[in-house]
Image (cartoon, coloured by chain):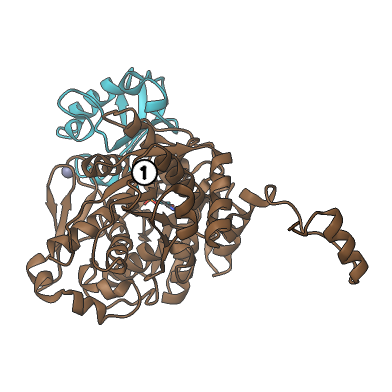
Amino acid sequence: MPKTLGMKCRECGEEYPLAPIHVCELCFGPLEVMLNWEEVSKKVSRKSIEAGPPSMWRYHDLIPVEGPPTVGLNVGFTPLVKATNLGKLLGLNNLYIKNDAVNHPTLSFKDRVVATALTKAREFGYDTVACASTGNLANSVAAHAAEGGFKSYIFIPFDLEQGKILGTLVYGTNLISVNGNYDEVNRMCAEAGGKYGWAFVNINLRPFYGDGSKTFGYEIAEQLGWRAPHHVVVPCAGGSLVSKIYKGFNELDRLGLLDGGVPTKMYAAQALGCSPITTAIKNKAEIFKPQKPNTIARSIAIGNPADGHVAIDTVRKSGGWAEDVTDEELIDGIKLLASTEGIFTETAGGVTVAVARKLAAQGRFEKDEIVVLAITGNGLKTQEAVAEHLGKPVLIQPNLTSLEQALNTERLLQSV
Amino acid sequence: MAVNVLIPTPLRKYTNDQEMVSAEAGNIASMVTDLERQFPGIGARITDEQGEVRRFVNVYVNEEDIRFLQGKDTELTDGDNISIVPAIAGG
Ligand SMILES: Cc1ncc(COP(=O)(O)O)c(C=O)c1O
Ligand SMILES: [Zn+2]
């Protein structure tokens, strides 16, 4: 029996056979892969998962590909770090960082979605992959295309950070920089659509791509000793990740693998300069209004989020909330996580930390509840964001007089 | 007013696989009406029972999202290029 049975529209319920298509023909709603739960529930147990590899593929039975993984075998199973110092500051005794800033190989959670999408692309018989990206997806598709021997075409807005551009080019891809913002890049890619016979990971492979993010949720629950946390704060761009983490918890619960069910409240985090999802949630609006992004948090600068409705539904259904922060606040967030926990995250992570701080100040978390921050990307990729906010190294001559002088004049010696 | 409409893949089965079609319309709402007249069945895919553009459908006039313009009342002029595009993920 196959593990994946077909696809179903999340909006109207229409069903489709398994194919590289991404939207419902009736209502344009997003399609989701239907797993064969009868088979899956016979196979999966805590033991079977724990016996798997130390990667996202320990959940292979729950990932919508048929065969074994062929690309990205070492992705995932990143550390869940107990953040005691930051916790103290926020008044939380059980604060955790799920640290995908050190995901293998391209240092963001996108490696999860790409490993899934490219394994499926190979099953569908594609030899060329493509994506539109705000940066992290570009890095990951380029790297995994190289590993998997695919040709690749990658479309980005022209004004991405240098680290994201270099970190794409180095893998030897066709990088196309589009004179427009991400939403314009995306529209163009959608119009190009099936024209070239490529596997577009965020377009025709979207149902598979999306479910790669479920593993972020599975891992959190397993690492907490098979329980879902009380609160998870997630940076939102297209709005997929936040709902897939929640889906991950609920699937484990459905399989009877969790102690204490899914009490989890999900929180959406965005930058004020691109906040269609958080604005809709905070205003209790029925639909989100697209925005023209204006923020240094480029990785999450999507003004017209494809899964925005899904993200909003997820946050509401879970009883969570949303917040947005200014660029200054997100820079402080990056510095705060670095100085308290020794973890250097990118702009999206700065948003998450700053939003968590706001939510904590609003009294949304009980002090002993388990709170998890989704840290989804690495700070070395967005150095421009903090470069002007860190001071400079102190330059001295290689002798003790110079050292002594510097320690005194720069007031580097802590007075006791 | 004659405008050009780019049809997305999921709707091309209504247009005999034509990617680009022409419509007579003064605004987006009447464009949908004219498309329905030419290609029966296509209208209900784009708008709902209340005539509102479905929430997963994006419509652009000369590359601008109509939600930044006047929505379904956005006026059209001769030669405008309209794209109908499903929402897509990414990041
Ligand atoms: C670092 C980082 N965090 C979070 C996200 C948000 O993911 P989603 O588009 O699934 O909301 C992205 C998307 O690009 C990202 O690059
Ligand atoms: Zn549907």
Report the front residue among B54 and B80.
B54
Residue A48 as seen in the image, left or right of residue B79: left
Q: Residues within 10 Å of mark 1 (few under 14, many from 20)?
A: many
Q: Quadrant of the C terminus of chain A?
A: bottom right
Residue A303 visible in rendering: no
> Does A341 sit above or below residue A58?
above
From this view, report whether residue B57 is shown above or below residue A168. above
Residue furthest front as drawn: A416
Picture quadrant where residue A324 is located = top left
- The residue that appears at 56% across and 43% down in the rendered structure is A296
Give the side of residue B2 with respect to residue A103, left or right.
left
**Figure chain in brown:** A
Subunit that carries the residue with mark 1: A
**x, y percentage for residue A9?**
17, 48
Looking at the image, which residue is at 41% across and 19% down? B77
Where in the figure is residue A60, as x and y percent of width and height?
Answer: 25, 73
Residue drawn at the location 18% of the way across and 42% of the way down: A11
Looking at the rendering, the quadrant in which ligand 2 lies is: top left
Instruction: Answer with left or right where residue A287 lies relative to residue A37.
Output: right
Q: In front here: A250 or A409? A: A409
How many numbered circles does the render carry? 1
Residue A358 or residue A123, whichever sits in front:
A358
What is the letter of the cyan chain?
A: B
Residue B86 rendering spot, x and y as whole percentages: 30, 42
Compared across the picture, whether A334 is left or right of A42 comes to: right
Res B10 seen here: yes
Q: Which residue is disc 1 drawn over?
A: A268
Q: Position of residue A329 (x, y in %)?
A: 55, 41
Please, what secondary structure does the residue beneath circle 1 have?
Answer: strand
Residue type at mark 1? Answer: Ala
Q: Quadrant of residue A364?
A: top left
